Amino acid sequence: MKVALFEQASSYAPYGGLIQIQSNALRAIERINKDVYDELVAAGTVTADRVSGLKIGYKRGNKLAGLYDKGDWLVRFDTLGPALEAGLPATVVVDRPVIQQIFVKHGFPEETVRIASRVVDYGDEGGCVKAVLEDGTVAYGDVLVGADGVWSSTVRVADQAQRRFSGFTCYAALADIRASNIEEVSYQILLGDKKYFVSTDGGGERQQWFALIREPPGGVDPEPTAENPTPKLDRLRREFADGNVYAADADGKVWDGFALELVEATPECDIKRRDLYDGAPLLDNLDLKRWWSPWADGRVAICGDAAHPMMPNLGQGGCQSTEDGYRLAEELATVTHTKDTSAALGSYSRKRVVRTSIVQGFAQLGSDLLVDFDLMMTIPLVGPFFLKATQLSMPWILRFLYTPEF
């Protein structure tokens, strides 16, 4: 199978922070290329060997619903057990540049990747698919797969998919710090009203963190000035105030100091901000044609965030994309004549869409519920019930995610 990969980046250079490769994605990679799998596992940091879970960000609750001090555990879950039950490897985190290097070393024949090549249009022509690049170059092939993200150029294949603003803006960075809880905790979320703070072990005495704040889209931070050289840091100090620089946040809450432990270890220039968008599952419509082949239209298909953008709190966006790649390769491998490519893409689409729609739903629901924990902690019976239900449901959710078949 001859492949051309059109990369819109103008140069090949290391880019981005960490990627969490969970157990299900590692199994897909192992099946695609064992050498790639071996090198990724060797290069990664295992995060499934310590506790993960949810903590309350500040003192909350009452005598009837339960009293919780800032930083208290609400829910803990084990990600290693469900993986081992399914015969899967443990989750690892790996730097994106390292992943790029490993893929280039093992996964791409020479001259496969063509940089500065953004597809802007496509269509059928003469029994094949024609792709038009931004510079006017035209390429022809038997199949076109759009794996170009939430605002995909090929997303009209899925014209029923509605891109949804999640309600959150996200600040994110990779901090060079040995976290104070590194020996016991690999992943935690500090919960609060209309915001929460996520952190995970990044390996090499680093922590990757995300601060998600509920607010309308389009917000922009002020540019640094002599009077305020760190506007992003200053906002985060206010949002997650721990009683040091600021006495409390805007609602009078004093946060557990772990959030600012990581924020203060991060230079202003390393903090990135973006509004988060996801999408309705592609089965969320009454068009029977869409149900029959929701991610494919003739010789054109989509995968990854182009097909199923999701909130980051499950860490499954890239993992589901990896599963897509495995299933796509398996279905195309059955093609013996180019006339069969459309059927193979339709089969790939049908086999993947139900699973990814469920994961999408889990991620959307989870993100929305995380910011409601604050209220639930004050309601008698409801708070304890919700915590117990979350604790009991997590192993089942993880068993669904960590399946060896996809």
Image (cartoon, helix red, strand yellow):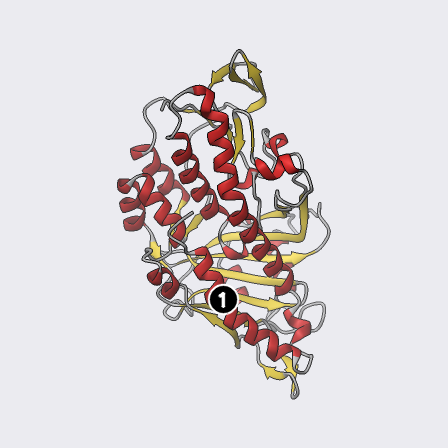
If the image is split into quadrants, where does the N terminus sit? top left
Q: How far across and how far down the image is residue 261, in percent?
A: 50, 65
Q: How far across and how far down the image is residue 374, in percent?
A: 65, 72
Q: How far across and how far down the image is residue 389, in percent?
A: 56, 73
Please state which of residues 165 and 402 is positioned toward the viewer in this rendering: 402
Please state which of residues 218 and 367 is positioned toward the viewer in this rendering: 367
Does 172 sit left or right of 377 as displayed? left
User: Which quadrant of the figure has residue 157?
Assistant: top right
> Residue extending furthest bottom?
63
Q: Which residue is located at x 47 percent, y 46 percent?
A: 320
Q: How many marks?
A: 1
The residue pinned by badge 1 equals 394
Q: Is residue 343 visible?
A: yes
The answer to whether 363 is drawn above or below residue 339 in the figure is below
Element at label 1: helix
User: Which quadrant of the figure has residue 82?
Assistant: bottom left
User: Tag 1: residue type?
Assistant: Met
Q: Is residue 59 visible?
A: no
Q: How far across and how far down the image is residue 83, in percent?
A: 37, 60
Q: Which residue is located at x 44 percent, y 20 percent?
A: 338
Count neighbours of disc 1 (C-alpha within 10 A) and say few if under 14, some if 14 to 19, many if 20 or more. some
Q: Which residue is located at x 32 percent, y 26 percent?
A: 109
Please state which of residues 192 and 375 is positioned toward the viewer in this rendering: 375
Q: Which residue is located at x 61 percent, y 51 percent?
A: 229
